[in-house]
């Protein structure tokens, strides 16, 4: 019981250090609102698109931090029941005929074979694409009016926000 409490406390401490997308948005807004858009693009790279607005401003889409994470397969070792040389399965079936009489049938099947001691796949290997996408709105003077993460994946480590990692938001 004490181990579970210690594990829960450690997990809470680790997760409390993680920055969520909403926390990253707040930090990014406070850091970049009012700054020239060119300052952002100079630091993090050019935008992937620009949409001009009628007021002379623009909406930029910036994307960065692309990374592919490989997640290995997860396996489970067979239990003693899985390793049994002979397995018996008992099945009981109760049926009612048209007259309402009940009939109960019990069937036992025993299978013989070589024990399979190879690990069982719980989750196959896969890849996961990580990235951060930000929408930046500017005024006619090309200063940032608003900025927000519009598409944010989990981070490369235990982080909950790739944008927090890429845009250097302290947790």
Image (cartoon, helix red, strand yellow):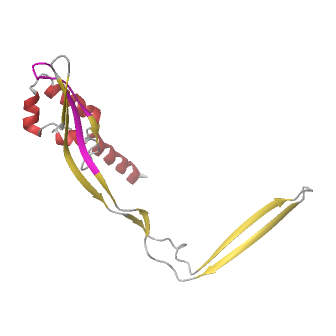
| Left or right of 169 in this view: 130 | right
Residue 102 on image: x %, y %: 86, 60
Residue 138 in view of the camera: no
Q: Is residue 109 above or below residue 158?
A: below
Farthest residue in the top direction?
A: 55
Percent coordinates x, y for residue 3 in the rendering: 38, 54
Q: Residue furthest right?
A: 99
Image location of residue 115, percent across then percent down? 52, 80
Magenta highlight on residue 40: no
Question: In this picture, is 110 found above or below 41?
Answer: below
- Residue shown at 11% from the left, 22% from the top: 143
Question: What are the residue bounds of the magenta stretch?
Answer: 129-149
**Viewer-proximal residue, 30 or 47?**
47
Image quadrant in which you'd find residue 107: bottom right
Looking at the figure, which quarter contains the C terminus?
top left
Query: So how many labels did they put on this image?
Result: 0
**Rendered image quadrant of residue 56:** top left
Residue 99 vertical position relative to residue 113 in the rendered view, above or below: above
Residue at x 40% of width, y 51% of height: 4
Judge whether 132 appears above or below 141 on screen. below
Q: On the picture, is 139 further left or further right than 112?
A: left
Examine the structure image and report whether residue 134 is included in the region drawn in magenta: yes
Relative depth, front residue between 123 and 82? 123
Q: Is residue 2 left or right of residue 60?
A: right
- Who's the residue at 9% across and 19% down the image? 141
Query: Can residue 114 be seen?
Result: yes
Question: Which residue is drawn at the image coordinates 23% and 41% (left, top)?
Answer: 132
> Percent x, y for residue 10?
31, 48
Kindly report the secondary structure that dominates the magenta region of the rendered protein. strand
């Amino acid at each position: 019981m004490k181990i579970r409490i210690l594990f829960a406390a450690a997990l809470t401490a680790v997760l409390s250090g993680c920055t969520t997308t909403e926390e990253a948005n707040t930090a990014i807004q406070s850091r970049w609102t009012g700054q020239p858009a060119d300052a952002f693009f100079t630091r993090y790279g050019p935008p992937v698109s620009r949409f001009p607005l009628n007021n002379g401003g623009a909406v930029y889409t910036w994307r960065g931090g692309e990374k592919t994470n490989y997640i290995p397969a997860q396996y489970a070792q067979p239990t003693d029941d899985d390793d049994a040389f002979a397995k018996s399965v008992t099945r009981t079936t109760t049926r009612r005929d048209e007259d309402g009489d009940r009939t109960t049938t019990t069937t036992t099947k025993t299978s013989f074979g070589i024990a399979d001691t190879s690990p069982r796949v719980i989750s196959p290997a896969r890849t996961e694409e990580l990235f951060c996408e930000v929408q930046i709105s500017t005024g006619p003077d090309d200063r940032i009016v608003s900025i927000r993460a519009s598409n944010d994946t989990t981070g490369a480590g235990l982080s909950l926000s790739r944008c927090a990692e890429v845009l250097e938001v302290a947790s």
